[in-house]
Amino acid sequence: ILAAQSRSCVQEVMIIAAALSIQDPRERPQDKKQAADEKHHRFSDKDSDFVAFIHLWNYIEEQQNALSVNQFRQLCHREFLHYMRVREWQDIYSQLKKSAQKLGLLTLSINHTEPHYFHVHTALLTGLLSHIGQKDMESHEFTGPRNIRFAIFPHSCLFKKPAKWIMVSELLETRRLWGHIAARIEPEWLEPLAGHLLKRHYSAPHWEKNKGAVIAHEKVTLFGLPIIYDRKINYGAIDPKLCRSLFIRQAL
């Protein structure tokens, strides 16, 4: 939520944070799975299960404003939404909003247009850096931090069309490890957020005449996952002694 302030998406991130703190308000009874899935599909986003919570929140707010309490209860029952969990979601959101206001964070009324994907998801990523995954192109699994392997939960919007990189809200272990609540991300989003968690590896330092400097190739990893490959960098500040030696041997 603090990270959302600079990205102008505090409201959206509070809605998502409140949703993740409770049991999913969307119900899926064993004998009515297909009917429930059809109702819930209206709120889906093609790239993010997190955004589905914003769509659902907007819908609930509109219906509550239009209906009596009893009518809204009936709507929740018909549309496979757990009424008490919806109320709990709203209560937690209200608590978060009060706390945010005390901290001086902007909590303007939500814009009912689509929130900016990059801003919302980079704000969420600040708290989920250990819940990222890179697609294994030879299987349906992802490689996560410290070489863990997991699959996307079957009800995710990304289950049938997984992205190359994802983040998930949590990892749940049953017969296999599942990533629950997933969203597409880009690896270049990670470097500015991860800071001291990154490890940098350098190779092939050499003098480049056209640049007038010693250049090396940099690989950046986060919890063992390579997020930047083979980036050319100026090696002068990293190993001045070696650079001086290379300059003398190769440039003079």
Image (tube, rainbow, N blue to C red):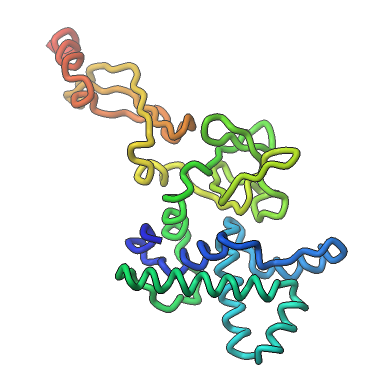
Q: Residue at x 55, y 46 (%)?
A: 166
Q: Which quadrant would residue 102 be assigned to in this image?
A: bottom left
Q: Which quadrant would residue 48 be assigned to in this image?
A: bottom right
User: Is 172 positioned to the left or the right of 114 in the image?
Assistant: right
Is 161 or 155 nearer to us in this picture? 155
User: Is 244 positioned to the left or the right of 7 in the image?
Assistant: left
Q: Residue at x 38, y 73 (%)?
A: 107
Q: Residue furthest right?
A: 31
Measured as percent of width and height from the top left, residue 23 is found at 64, 62
Q: Residue at x 55, y 74 (%)?
A: 90
Is 1 or 225 nearer to us in this picture? 1
Measured as percent of width and height from the top left, residue 22 is found at 60, 62
240 w.r.t. 3: above or below: above
Measured as percent of width and height from the top left, residue 37 is found at 76, 64
The C terminus, quarter of image: top left
235 w.r.t. 122: above or below: above
Q: Residue at x 13, y 10 (%)?
A: 248
Measured as percent of width and height from the top left, residue 39 is found at 74, 71
23 w.r.t. 189: above or below: below
165 w.r.t. 241: above or below: below
